[in-house]
């Protein structure tokens, strides 16, 4: 087996173990929180933020009102809204500040993190605990991958899995979702 193949197998193995360890109860609660929100806002820094931007696109395809924190057209968050915030450490300054502002405005927070007792976790009404290495964990105990790769990949896959479940529950066809796909590309 060549090195590329070995690396792919290692990454897939880490993802399989990590995703299997995420609570199904937490995932179900997160889905309900998102579907029950008046509007959904997403925030995260770096690659975690990119993963949530991809999730925001899929939630928009479901017909949900979704906004990415920091974009020029993002409105004020308020009561009835949910902020989906990802930070492996739960201490990323901008993400924690967004969660604090959201709570003060009456919104709820759904945190995706490795650290449920972190500042982000304390602001969250719901937590999706992902048992992965954070970018500060360079020891290789939880992942052979660099920095927070396993956490970031897990955020994307968990959000995609939740999208699949929500799509199935809503019973819309792919053609119905496609009508919401961007046409100004």
Image: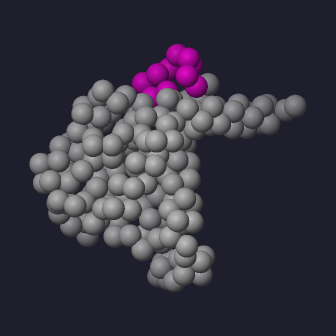
For the image, the number of numbered tags is 0
Q: Is residue 142 magenta?
A: yes
Q: Which residue is located at x 52 percent, y 65 percent?
A: 169
Query: Would residue 159 be visible to someone looking at this image?
Result: yes
Which residue in the rendered view is the most extreme toward the left?
Answer: 104
- Using residue 91 as the reference point, say whether residue 7 is left or right of it: right
- Using residue 130 as the reference point, say whether residue 70 is left or right of it: left
Q: Nearer the viewer, residue 154 or 167?
A: 167
Q: Nearer the viewer, residue 67 or 149?
A: 67
Q: Which residue is located at x 31 percent, y 58 percent?
A: 41
Q: How is the image coloured?
A: one colour
Q: Which residue is located at x 13 percent, y 54 percent?
A: 105
The N terminus lies in quadrant: top right
Q: Position of residue 123 (x, y in %)?
A: 23, 39
Query: Would residue 94 be visible to someone looking at this image?
Result: no
Range of magenta residues: 133-143
Which residue in the rendered view is the most extreme toward the right?
Answer: 1
Query: Does 178 sit above or below residue 120?
Result: below
Q: Nearer the viewer, residue 184 or 80?
A: 80
Which of the 4 quarters of the picture holds residue 70? bottom left
Q: Is residue 139 magenta?
A: yes
Q: Position of residue 164 (x, y in %)?
A: 56, 60
Q: Position of residue 131 (x, y in %)?
A: 49, 29
Q: Which residue is located at x 27 percent, y 47 percent?
A: 109
Magenta segment's dominant SS is loop
């Amino acid at each position: 087996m060549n090195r590329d193949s070995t690396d792919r197998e290692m990454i897939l193995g880490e993802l399989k173990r990590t995703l299997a360890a995420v609570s199904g109860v937490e995932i179900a609660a997160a889905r309900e929180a998102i579907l029950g929100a008046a509007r959904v806002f997403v925030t995260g820094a770096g690659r975690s933020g990119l993963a949530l931007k991809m999730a925001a696109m899929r939630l928009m395809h479901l017909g949900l009102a979704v906004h990415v924190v920091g974009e020029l057209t993002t409105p004020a968050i308020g009561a009835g809204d949910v902020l989906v915030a990802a930070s492996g450490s739960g201490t990323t300054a901008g993400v924690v500040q967004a969660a604090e502002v959201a709570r003060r405005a009456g919104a709820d927070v759904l945190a995706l993190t490795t650290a449920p007792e972190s500042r982000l976790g304390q602001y969250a009404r719901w937590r999706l605990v992902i048992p992965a290495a954070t970018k500060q964990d360079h020891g290789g105990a939880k992942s052979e991958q660099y920095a927070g790769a396993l956490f970031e990949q897990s955020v994307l896959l968990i959000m995609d899995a939740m999208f699949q479940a929500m799509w199935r529950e809503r019973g819309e066809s792919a053609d119905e979702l496609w009508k919401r796909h961007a046409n100004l590309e």
